[in-house]
Amino acid sequence: MAIMEFLFPLLFLFGLLWSISKIGFFKNSPFSIRSLQFAFTVRVAMGFVLFLIYSEYYTVRQDADTFKYFDDSKYMYDAFWSHPLDYFQMLLGIDCDTEYFNTNYFNHMSNWVRSYDNGLFNDNRLVIRINAFMRIFSFGNYHVHSILLSYFAFLGSFSLANVFYKVSKLKMASYFAVFLIPSVVFWSSGILKEAILLFALGSFTFCIYKLFGTSKRFRTYAILFLMSCILIVMKLYVFVAFIPAVIAWLVVSKWRRGLWVYVLVYLSFFILVSLVGELSPRYDFVNLLVDKQKQFIGLSEFYKVNSGFAMETLSYDLWSIVKASPEGLFNVLTKPWPNEVNSILFLPPFFENSLIFALIVLCLLYRKSLNQKEWDFVVFCLSFCFILFVVIGLTTPITGALVRYKIPAIPFLFMAIFLFTNEDKIPRFVSQNKAIKFIKGFI
């Protein structure tokens, strides 16, 4: 039995590696098949490392992120054999908000109902449903779920890499930004929400870029709609930060150019969000931010989180948000600080932050002039990062959570920095290094 539990995931792994070598979506990309297979294998390996870490250091399994959704999905999956109609109702969310389903299924789960409820979408349920569906052909093997979700995250990263390359024509930089950032790879591998989030965000960005061209197929719009739904359910704040940046990017690329377009789009978006808040206080963005911060501070104090830190408490007014934004942005960009690196999990993000600041210095020393298309993309990337980082910084008083929540924007931040750097000005002993030449040939 133990041998089959080991061989079954390997069968899925080799099958997916084979698919990368055969599917046209991968074969027609600028990246070599072996480099894509390597990137996927690294993600699978990180998913296994995640499994080992949570197995060894998190004694309460129902609180361990990578196990809790997988374990809860079994209660839903069991109905597939005994009460198939119940299973499909729960899977699709049709008429299952009743006492019957609560008593027989949901009350047995630890995470169907979140420890806090801000009145918005419950992303736990989507992850549980996805795992319940996977159980049909995984036979309850955890590592099969981990490999499949890693593959979805890989698809999202690959889609992003394609967009980055089409804009920049920088193959090595595009590959590095999406496949080799340690925190992004680690936290989007295995059975975690971030794997689904990255898949949806990368696919959404790829579809948006396709709309810039002349080919507008129904399939592109259908995928765009599906990815929008996933993003809204998974992380609404990521979607809200992304949409105005995308709209402005689309406008400046196709019709009007200039930074004033971004100002106008964001001002319009702010007015729209404010009107929604006036019509329905439940969705007022100030209230949502303040409530989210209170919930996080409460969780940090209740669980006595080691990486918690003090932050300015928000009040229910806009000026409080504006005043606290610089501190929030600073925390997201710089944490974990050297004195906070008390866990091996904090080492990669610490070195990443150091690398970001080193690359900023490098691009200032070897800066290049950007064409209009590159400028449009850089402003798009930085505007998305800015809004998302501010929202995260205002609401998250836990360094470990900061590291995870900002990963959707990290590839965009790295790519914006790479676009500013002139490779031709970098000293030859660096650019012509044998290791660099080998990596370029491999990618």
Image: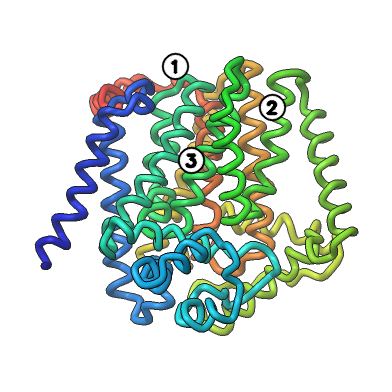
Which element is circle 1 on?
helix
Distance from label 2 to label 3 (Cα)? Answer: 31 Å
Number of marks: 3
> What x and y, as percent, mark residue 56?
28, 74
The N terminus lies in quadrant: bottom left
Which element is circle 3 on?
helix
Query: What's the residue type where badge 1 is placed?
Result: Asp
Q: Nearer the viewer, residue 196 or 364?
A: 196
User: Few, some or many C-alpha atoms within 10 Å of disc 2 (few <14, some 14-19, many ≥20)?
Assistant: some
Q: Which mark is residue 345?
A: none
Residue 96 visible, this orientation: yes
Do the CB atoms of the residues marked 2 and 3 lie less than 8 Å apart? no
Residue indicated by mark 1: 424
Residue indicated by mark 2: 250
Distance from label 3 to label 1 (Cα)? Answer: 18 Å
Q: Where is residue 301, by image quadrant?
A: bottom right
Query: What's the residue type where badge 3 is placed?
Result: Ala
* Viewer-nearest of discs 1 and 2: 2
Residue at (72, 69) in percent of width and height: 312
**Relative horizontal placement of residue 257, taking residue 210 as reference (left or right):** right
